Image (spheres, grey):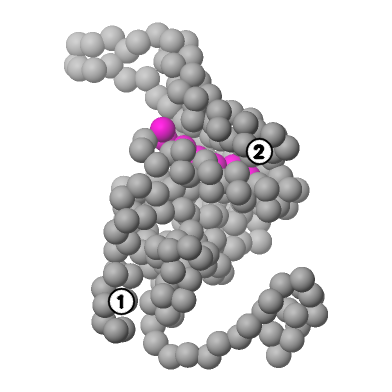
Amino acid sequence: MLQDELTVACPALRVTAEYTTGSAEQVLARRAGPEGRIVVGGSSTGSRPTLGRVAGRLVRDAPCPVLVHRAGGDPTGPVVVGVDCRPGTAELIGAAVDEACVRGSSLVVLHAWRVHGTGPSSAAPPEHSVAQAEADLLERLVADVRTGHPAVPVELVLRPGTAADRLLEAAESAAVLVLGRHGLRPRVPARRTSGWVLDRVGCPVLVVPVGADVRRPRGVVRARTSAR
């Protein structure tokens, strides 16, 4: 029995088993709640990793972080968190440093940026000035992490280019990739960087609801209401 095997393999953990009926994603979301964590396996189409139906819905709707486990990546590598410096970024970095503490890993905070002009006839600002401004902002965002978790090595990586490309590059040597969910829609991955990456990255991915998604998880609220 799996419960017995896990109890022997992980004697320090309390392992329980539960048999129930219902929609897998709704049952898992209710059981975990906002303070829990859900771990699901990833799927693949040929040699390409994809999200299965249950994992896709949980990544989109669950009120708590969801870890999509995949066999790729480097178990000895860092925890890599992709940030866009929008509201919720500090919360996302906090979840990533917690993951690094659990794994005994270093933390890489990755931010990709592109220089754009403000109009058809506008010249883009100098690239070096944009890079310095982005670096200053990111340093402020990780200041609390450096102070509160001095044992966790933190590396800031700022690279020009698209976020999706930079995340895929970093994931090749990562133990786990941490992404924020700002209204993620895995069914249309081309519209969202996170969805696009989830359908291509080979390492484990932790998706963390941040900002408005924490207060108002979609789908799960309706599931809870109907279960009462």
Q: Residues within 10 Å of mark 2 (few under 14, many from 20)?
A: few
Rounded to the nearest angstrom, the CA distance separating label 2 from label 1 is 37 Å
Quarter holding residue 33 = bottom left
Quadrant of the frame with the N terminus: bottom right
Q: Are marks 2 and 1 in contact (CB under 8 Å)?
A: no
Give the residues drawn in magenta, as a range.
79-85
Residue where numbered disc 2 is placed: 149
8 up-or-down from 75: above or below:
below
Numbered-mark total:
2
Dot 1 falls on a residue whose secondary structure is: helix
The label number, if any, that marks residue 73 in the structure image: none
The label number, if any, that marks residue 223 in the structure image: 1
What residue type is disc 2 on? His
Q: Position of residue 172 (x, y in %)?
A: 63, 45
Dot 2 falls on a residue whose secondary structure is: loop
Residue 117 shows in the view: yes
Q: Name the residue rendered at 55%, 67% in the picture.
A: 39
Q: Name the residue rendered at 71%, 45% in the picture.
A: 105
